[in-house]
Amino acid sequence: MEFAELIKTPRADNVVLHRPFEPAVEGTLCLTGHHLIFSSRRQDNAEELWLLHSNIDSIEKRFVGSLGTIVIKCKDLRIIQLDIPGMEECLNIASSIEALSTLDSVTLMYPFFYRPMFEIVEDGWSAFLPEKEFEFLNALTDEWRLTYINKDFSICPSYPPVVTVPKSIDDETLQKVAVFRHGGRFPVLSYYHKKNGMVMMRTSQPLTGTNGKRCKDDEKLINSTLGPGRRGYIIDTRSLSAAQQARAKGGGFGVEVYYPQWRRIHKSVERFNILQESLIKLVEACNDQSHNMDRWLSKLEASNWLTHVKEILTAGCLAAQCIDREDASVLVHGTEGTDSTLQITSLAQIILDPDCRTIRGFESLIVREWLQAGHPFQQRCAQSAYSNSKQKWEAPVFLLFLDCVWQMLHQFPCSFEFNEHFLVTLFEHAYASQFGTFLGNNENERSKLKLPQKTMSLWSWVNQPEELKNFKNPLFEANSLVIWPSVAPQSLQLWEGVFLRWNRPSKFLDEAQEEMRKIISDNRVLQEKVNYLRRKVAHMETNDEMQEDL
Amino acid sequence: MLGSGAKAAKPSFVSYISPEEIHVKEPIEKEVNPHLLPGEQLLCEASTVYKYIQEDGSNRGTYGKLVCTNFKIAFLDDDSTSDDNEPQFKNKIIGENDITLQCVDQIYGVYDEKKKLLTGQLRKYPEKLIIYCKDLRVFNFCLRYTKEEEVKRIVSGIIHHSQTPKLLKRLFLFSYASAAPNNTDARNQTVMFDTLEDWRDELERTKGNVQYKAVSTNEGYRVSEKLPLYFVVPICVSEESILKYEGRGIPIWCWSCHNGAALLKMSAFPKEQDDSASQMQKAFLDGIYRTIRKPPYELLKTDDLSSSLPSLQEIQTAYTRFKQLFLIDNSTDFWATDVKWFSLLESTNWLEIIRRVLKKAIEVVECLERQHTNVLLIEENATDLCCVISSLVQVMMDSYSRTKLGFQSLIQKEWVIGGHGFLDRCNHLHKSDKEEAPVFLLLLNCVWQLVQQYPPAFEFTETYLTVLSDSLYVPIFSTFFFNSQHQKDTTATGESLKTQSGPFRFLTVWDWSVQFDLKAQAFLNNPLYAEKPKPEKSQRKTARFKHQRQLSLPLTQTKSSPKRGFFREETDHLIKNILGKRIGKFINSSDEPPNNFREFYDSWHSKPVDYHGLLLPRIDGPEIKVWAQRYLRWIPEAQLHGGGTIATAAKILDLMEEVQNLQVKMDEEHSQAVSGGIHAVPMLRNSARLSSLFPFALLQRQSVKPALPTSTWKDLEDEDDLVKRDDEFVDLSSDIL
């Protein structure tokens, strides 16, 4: 298919662009296969807008006479308005945008066409290989091994080819366990807590069904991870009743008799459309331009967003608490084990492991616990807050996770190497990007699409020194401690950097950021100077001594 | 500070163990004597009182003695010798277990698990006493192990001294002043506004002396007991007219803005029945207005605050509901508010009141700044909301008011000398609940919104505002314990005549060294305060600032057209309203196109902030926040170990100290002269060890453990081996190295 077929009117003049907090600009609008481009052509391309079609969440058009108006609502929550003279042009442009922003085929997406203008220092696709991660683990304990049982994705389509499992369990057993677990997601290692050797594992629900089926191999695997006299907690991300209901559909939960050292905790975390509706309500409340902001707090509460943040964060804390405070291992699962399970395992790691609070460590966490672990990004992030499609599989699961991380960043401003901008960037790229990282729903799909060969990884771009400095938190001071966030509603804040981002002028914030970067670089130059002078002094002193000795 | 027994109870759920079991060896009768201030007398005491540590609903706590003096209620820990952890931020007057009698909000007794409000005479004595404080602390005392006689004495003593009506002269203020003659008075740089010179200086500072004059007409309080001895009126107002209606209907000057427009306040006439009298008043007002009308500042806008802002009653109700959200008995209560937190918050209406007050202040600023119009605030006595609005306007417009001295002088000018009835509004004497209204707290809450939105614009910190709000209840300072200057002067001389020691000289709250040592005082100063640039530079700045404003704001008609008739036509109408009922909707902001205000507000916010120029708060819903430090500081569940804004602040202070030290070193290099050790800000090297509740909570007291909603553990009810241990502070760094 040629994009040209979809673009009947590639260009319109005398279009007026309205953006919040900026004066309206007149200029030319161009449509390309992947971008909506606006240029005022006044001077040196002063007013340029490049908008990825895939970033467009919804579009509305209306007419006053022959002047058409298109309102574009983006997945990053921005809203812009274009006034286009000429009814036909306007209709054409609107329908092109609609078609181009909802392309069916992944291979037509921009990442497959994007050619980077920078030199790749380190290829992000191979920066976080499971083998490398395993080396670190193997230095600490020899109770785990890598298995290649899933190398052709036949055992579990949503798992990566390589996963970490208990050493004592052979591939044959794994195969049997996979049959007993939803989607073949047998228990795998998620995190090893150095301090006390406790582990966190994740899986999906066991397929016990109504007649309480059991699987000896599953029991063997799970029980083998606890030493004698040790205890573990199974954190089920559903309420007890939801877990019981799941039995009717063939799912269920492990019965304690068969897992004697384990205790089950039900910590219900919402999923799917409830989260999506919550996001829609929240963004509606935030965009409410009535200046009184009457009932703001009730609207905020009614959206339930912060309640979800609290629930998820609490579940993460609970898992971390079991590991660090109770000296117990933890197994996390819900139904599929691809959403709430990952939120919890990744948050617990951020609480427990200072490495995850560095940029590199956080990237590695996203790769391990979200991308390789099979969070279906393509489905979940197909639409954002302005969606009206109401598809069951769309849900801001990842955004909620980022929000929880932001809450911690906000509460512990000095303990994270990255800044808020980094989290916002990840949010944007998860929904629309020139990079291939967040395409596809799991490693299986990514390898079929040959993403590593055909697209650029987000990490290749982020990890360039030039870019990296924009994501650094100037207040960072390595904190080797476990951080316990407060989950009280009084401590949780609305993430203004995402939800109020377009409702307030950003110019001065940007200037402040710029100033901060300047200070940091000045400081570095001065530091170098100091070091140079120190060396010189030291050198001169030793010379003096030598002369005295003589 | 845990009782040693609490630690012994480690192995299982502490809440199942009653205090008797924990403290078998206790109590040892040890003589612990309260630390008494000069003039302070011990009134009653009770020993073997058990104070709960308000943490997790468990029964952990310590034994000690509960005493009541004519100044405070104090709990004396039997273990008080363990003072090795001297906090960095300590109040010298009020210890952490001290409650001044004026700080007591409500006292509840617990009878058979039921809470009952205690007020007057008691027939039965409770087994548990819960004291809610106005600074939002909550104390739980168990009296079960105390001798019955002592229980009776202490409970009735506490209730009598803290909850029943009192005579002014019985305030501790007087005993203290007579026992500790204050000779430190000295060079407090805060302008007190109790002399004619202070007012003249202020006129000169604001360049208001062309149009306004300081008068001494009220010397000896011959005009009114409500007015201060000295104040400022328009130059054309004659002495006779001031005398005429006991100072009512006289516009009193608050402040002049750089363009000459002034902010004035005026107390309204009482509703007059007699027709001829009201005619006379009308004529009088007419004359007064005409005099202010002189060009070039002929415009005058009046605003009746009693109709355009919430009533004191509403403010009181809102605050009562609001503070209830933070007076929490135990963590179960805390998590119970969880689900409905935002709607609870909204239903109190307190944040909305703050927003409305800020909005009103911006409207006044708009008149002064953009329309060059004099603004006259009217209120019944001009001593409540007038003070709030005029103070806020000055904080927003006058960068001097954003320095510590400037802010203190402002409080002196508008509130203390201005005649705000602190005694009645705080209900210090328990005379009448009807008069009580947290007007001054409202101001501090509004100023806090500005401080948190523009930290570099203020020389003081939020901690300063918090301790200032606490000082409202410390009766050793005269500042907040009189209704007017007249009351202070007459009571002081009257009382001292009896003791024949010459007039009392009271302490002022602005002498912070009374409450805090130098180290602690450092927390009141904002290290990031953007110092004011050199004078000539700042003038250039304002000039440019004005220029910018004109560029973006199309000059509205207001400047030229109403010159002719604004005042004339409106006067009759205005006077009609002033002499009768409330002005109602007359000339408050709704009178003009509302987007006038909005335009001003938006255009200001679209420009860079000049920290020494005009400062407008953002007032959209999400911008108005809860003053977390003041309201959450005693709630352990809201605590973050190694986090919170204090982590940032500590880091910045560290950097500042480093820069200062480097500066000193460089100076030494240059001059070779060894300078005396500079006063470095006291700092806390490792921000990871600080708690977000710092400086109001000690780390040592709580264990580092996650605070999770108790409901989380409900699923584990039978799991009593899942212990909540009090963990030692675990330093993982050794594991990592």
Image: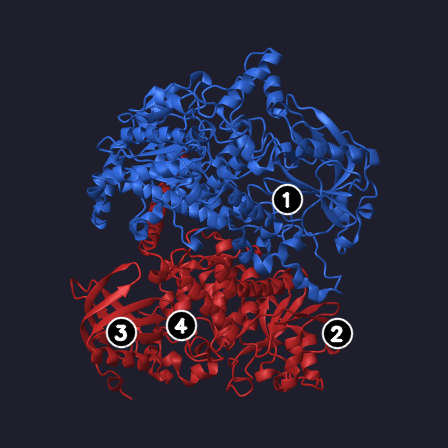
Quarter residue B424 falls in: top right
Task: Report how far apart the C-alphas of labels 3 and 1 lie in the structure.
Answer: 58 Å
Quarter of the figure with the N terminus of chain B: top right
Work out whether residue B691 can be spotted.
no
The structure residue drawn at horizontal position 22% and vertical position 83%, both measured from the top left corner, is A8
Work out whether residue A224 can be spotted.
yes
Disc 2: which residue: A260
C-beta proximity under 8 Å, tags 3 and 2 = no
Colour applied to chain B: blue
* Chain of residue at mark 3: A
Number of numbered labels in the structure image: 4
**Is tag 3's residue or tag 2's residue first in the polypeptide sequence?**
3
Query: Mark 2, mark 4: which one is toward the viewer?
Result: 4
Disc 1: which residue: B700
Query: Mark 3, mark 4: which one is toward the viewer?
Result: 4
Q: Is residue B387 left or right of residue B233?
A: right
Task: Report how far apart the C-alphas of labels 2 and 4 lie in the structure.
Answer: 48 Å
Kind of residue at disc 4: Tyr
